[in-house]
Image: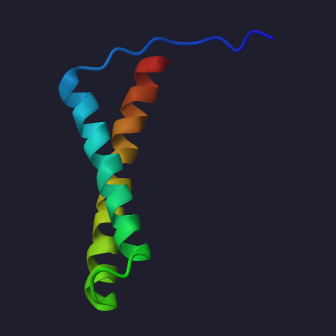
Amino acid sequence: MDIGTKKVTLALPELGLIAMTRGMFGVGIGLLLSEVLDKRTARGVGIALAAVGVLTTVPLLLRVRGEMD
């Protein structure tokens, strides 16, 4: 079975943006699951970081997917 691969070239700033948005999402989820901060603060910051991470990752991924076609 030949799945095939496609080569996508990303500039360093684009790769950095993708990494940062994924990191924000991960930190947000981590805060939601942790007990380091009080629940109200952790929940607010966690939801904000996770939401920003997801909302900024989607357009970047769509752009990369568009370059793959």
Q: Looking at the image, which residue is at 35% across and 63% down? A: 50
Nearer the observer, 36 or 59: 36
Against 55, residue 51 (above or below) is below
Left or right: 14, with 64 as reference point: left
Q: Point out the residue furthest to the left here.
A: 13
Camera sees residue 67: yes
Q: Looking at the image, which residue is at 28% across and 29% down? A: 15
Image quarter in which the N terminus is found: top right
Against 58, residue 39 (above or below) is below
Identify the coloring.
rainbow
Give residue 11's quadrant in the image: top left
Nearer the observer, 22 or 56: 22
Against 65, residue 7 (above or below) is above
In the rendered image, residue 57, in percent from the top left (x then y), is placed at 36, 46
Q: Looking at the image, which residue is at 37% across and 31% down? A: 63
In the rendered image, residue 38, in percent from the top left (x then y), is placed at 28, 89
Left or right: 64, with 14 as reference point: right
Give residue 48's quadrant in the image: bottom left
Against 67, residue 38 (above or below) is below
Q: Looking at the image, which residue is at 30% across and 39% down? A: 19
